[in-house]
Amino acid sequence: ELESRRALAFDRREDAVVDVCFCMDLTSSMSSWMSAAKAHLTQIIRGLQAETSVAAIRVAFVGYRDYRDGDRVVTKDFVTMDKVEEVVTFISSQSASGGGDLPEDVLSGMEAVSSLDWQGHVRLVVHVADAPAHGYCDHRSYGDDFPSGQCPDQTRHLPDVVRELKDDRSVDLLFCRIQDGLTKDMEHMFAQVYDGPGFGIVPMSRGATKFREVILGALSRSLLKLIADADIDGVQTFHGSTLSAALATCNASLRESFQAVAQALAREEEE
């Protein structure tokens, strides 16, 4: 799971501002995931604020396609939580289109993410994709028009941009794995660049219908573990984490358990 870092110091969770950017592959195979983002983004952000009690959450969106596609990269810079519907409307204006070979132009997407107006005490990008970047797949099996990792108009390399996010922007990366195996080389590169805290993977094997549940759970657990240290300093559990961090993790896990029970009961009633 993701172990978040602090970009800026804060003493209490009520003082913390959290920046969350959703970066999404917008090519043809991502239609159901785009629909899930449109349907649940507002609930995810409001739920995250309710569970963490931080001062504010700002939201941004970056979508990318591939080199030859129209609207290759689209961006909605950060807005405050009360304007999250602007982000939803922006996503709704996009359609799942494009893509040819298996990989997509993740590099341009991450460059756009790095260029956003990052200001929060905690900074997170949630990367949702079912295909790797150019240069990060077996091109002999799947085909890669640009196996060097660069499209014809690009001069930078993806690891350098990710390193810029990590070191210069203090942005953490949560990768949502949709296709087991297809993105493993890109995931490995992400992990190598971060080399510790700041990077995590959340499997999305339960499908787009569980988008809200899985994303909210992963973000809540990560943030609660981090901000708990600002609430209770020095009260340790047996493995060294703070007591409030342990309680916060239990809270996120219980919420998911209650959701699972409620869904099971609803299915029984339908039957």
Image (cartoon, rainbow, N blue to C red):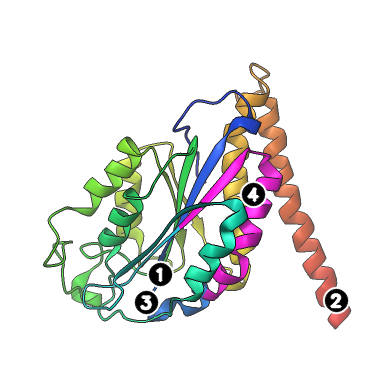
Query: For the residue marked with disc 4, what is the amino acid?
Result: Leu
Where is residue 55? Give x, y as percent. 63, 38
The residue where tag 3 is placed is: 27
Q: CA distance from mark 1 to mark 4?
A: 25 Å
Query: For the residue marked with disc 2, what is the amino acid?
Result: Glu
The residue where tag 1 is placed is: 130
Label 2 vs label 1, nearer the camera:
1
Query: For the residue marked with disc 1, what is the amino acid?
Result: Asp
- Work out whether mark 4 precedes mark 2 in sequence or the reverse, and give the earlier one: 4
What range of the chain is rendered magenta? 35-60
- Residue under the image location 30 percent in, 47 percent down: 162
Where is residue 133? Give x, y as percent. 28, 63
- Work out whether mark 2 precedes mark 1 in sequence or the reverse, and give the earlier one: 1
Mark on residue 268?
A: 2
Q: Is residue 137 left or right of residue 118?
A: left
Q: Residues within 10 Å of mark 4 (few under 14, many from 20)?
A: many
